[in-house]
Image (spheres, rainbow, N blue to C red):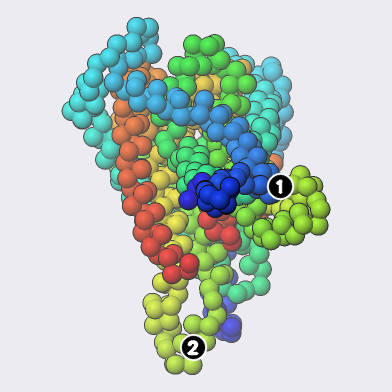
Amino acid sequence: MEDTISIKGKFVYYILLIIVAVAVLFPFVWIFLTSLKTPGDITCYPPKFIFNASWDNYKSLFTKSQAGAAASTLNFSRYYLNSLIVAGFGTLLSLIIGFGAGYALTRAKFRKEATRENVAFTLLSFWFGPELAIILPLYIFFNKFGLLDNHFALILAYQLIGVPFAVWMSRSFFSDVPISVEEASRIDGYTAIQTFWKITFPMVKSGLAATAILTFIFEWNNFLFALVIGGRNTMPVTTGALGFISYEAALWGQMAAAIILSSVPQLIIAMFVQKNMVRGLTFGAVKG
Amino acid sequence: MQTDRQWHFFIIEKGGVWQLSKVKAQKSAREIENNKLKYFLWPAIIIPLCIGIIPYFTGIGLSFTNWKLALSNIRFVGLRNYIEMFSNPDFWNAAKVTISFSGLSLLVEIVFGFFVGWLLSVNLKGQAFFRSIILIPLMVAPVLSALMWKLMLPQHGVINYLLSFIGINAVSWLSNPHTALITLVIIDAYINLPFVAIIILAGFQSLPKEPYEAAVVDGASKLFIFKKITFPLITPLILLALIFRFILSLKTFDIIYATTGGGPGNVTTNLHLFAYINTFKYGQGAKSTAVVLILFLIIFIVSSKLIKRWTKATAYQK
């Protein structure tokens, strides 16, 4: 707003901004340093900023023969694979369901106009209600049908996060396309399906890509569903990472390495959706 | 009125008698196809119905039974779970923790989030860099961020080391009953403050120019401009951030479970965690369902109040 900022003012702003940036980045830097340390370096006080770095913690995450009995039950590569399977297929399913529904909610005609918002808000309430209200009864069902600790069941449960998000976000992009554009294309002789693929889709492509990425991140980050209805075989990184500190062992270095490996990839893909982040995180309420 | 979409009415003459005749209206191709679009909604209704709505209502039913994890025959017990819950001091403790945790973290996140959002909106070189840095905590799984802090916070951890330079004595932040809750608030703020900040930033970026030009012409002071122009224009966004954060902080689970597990004692056990511990540690399934339903109700009441305020605040834009 202020068009001219004095040199002194600029200096103050930059100092404040740098403080914020350091506060955000410090934990990542420190955890990365921790992941390169030996157990002795990790627990020593005062903490070491300079030490002999080694990749041992990362290596040991992917090799089974680990010192200590507790460590042998930890299988990080398995957790990672689980996360990829569950969040990957979960996202795919969420998008197939969510984009169709998002488009329908934007363009379909309803006998009662209220249906539109009722469906949308019912979906949204899954995101805002306490998860346990749904996951506890679901636990009984899955237990009864022998679906606990099952990839497919977890993927299904993840739809409670993925579908509402994909519907709301894609709907927000679809409604950015003026209806008159679609009508013009229909008058020119395109069918509804051609209109969608040739006119609407190219206009919302980047928005849908952002939706896909954010859906994946949200499903990857989920913790409570996996905690209740997952188990040894389906454990994703979020619940798996907890296992590094237990009564039997405190594998700080490996935990740090696991945290870095589980969070850095999504930080990289998140960089592609910066522009749509605000819209995504507010379910389309702020266009940003 | 609904009917005249499907039927057209004509008054026609038939054999010297005037009579009302109805003819089925031709629907336009577009209308038919828009009707068909509704079928795309079904998967989005059926799957959440099976894995969301049915379990949810089952949960309501279960809260009136004696369901326990180890128990196979489920019996109806009426309101007993609710009555026992309300006379349980642990429940009230959890309610108190929920409110103080949410209240404190909201206060911190809104106040400092507003400040950071404003800071990021200042027109400076290199802002793009700072604006992308602030997004990082939002994308990492909350449970992993919480674990990072857990690794930094022990008695001999790096945080205590850094604090020793400004004369703060080492405390084991997460296992001391006096500091555990406030430490969790700070961890929560680390994860969620950026959310508030980017919403406020979006608000600052979409401020219209005209009122400011008019105010400058009128010779208004900076404080006056902020109070009378900027703040009212930003208010809907503050409310929006408040709605989101309030709802989500009331059901915080991940970060507490990963760091303190509700301890020491029960000083950080909020309602959501209380329900989890009750189910999987003590096997009290039905009572826990009652607890989460109460929590759901609280969230519902508070959020509908806030949403009403928000609709009012944004009414002038429509």
Residue B149 numbered mark, or none? none
Q: Position of residue B46 (x, y in %)?
A: 55, 29
Identity, as a three-letter code, of the amino acid under mark 2 = Ala
N-terminal label among 1 and 2: 1
Q: Nearer the viewer, residue B302 or B204?
A: B302
| Residue A153 visible here | yes
* Residue beneath disc 1: B29
Image quadrant containing the N terminus of chain A:
bottom right
**Horizontal side, residue A216 vs residue B74: left or right:** right
Identity, as a three-letter code, of the amino acid under mark 1 = Ala
**Horizontal side, residue A91 vs residue B16: left or right:** right
What residue lies at 38% left-to-right and 63% top-to-bottom?
B312
As helix, strand or loop, the secondary structure at mark 2 comes to helix
Q: Position of residue B245 (x, y in %)?
A: 43, 50
Same chain, labels 1 and 2: yes
Image quadrant containing the C terminus of chain A:
bottom right
Q: Chain of mark 1?
A: B
As helix, strand or loop, the secondary structure at mark 1 comes to helix
What residue lies at 60% left-to-right and 18% top-to-bottom?
A150
* Residue beneath disc 2: B214
What residue lies at 26% left-to-right and 31% top-to-bottom?
B91
How dense is the environment of label 1, judged by Cα within 10 Å: few (below 14), some, or many (20 and up)? few
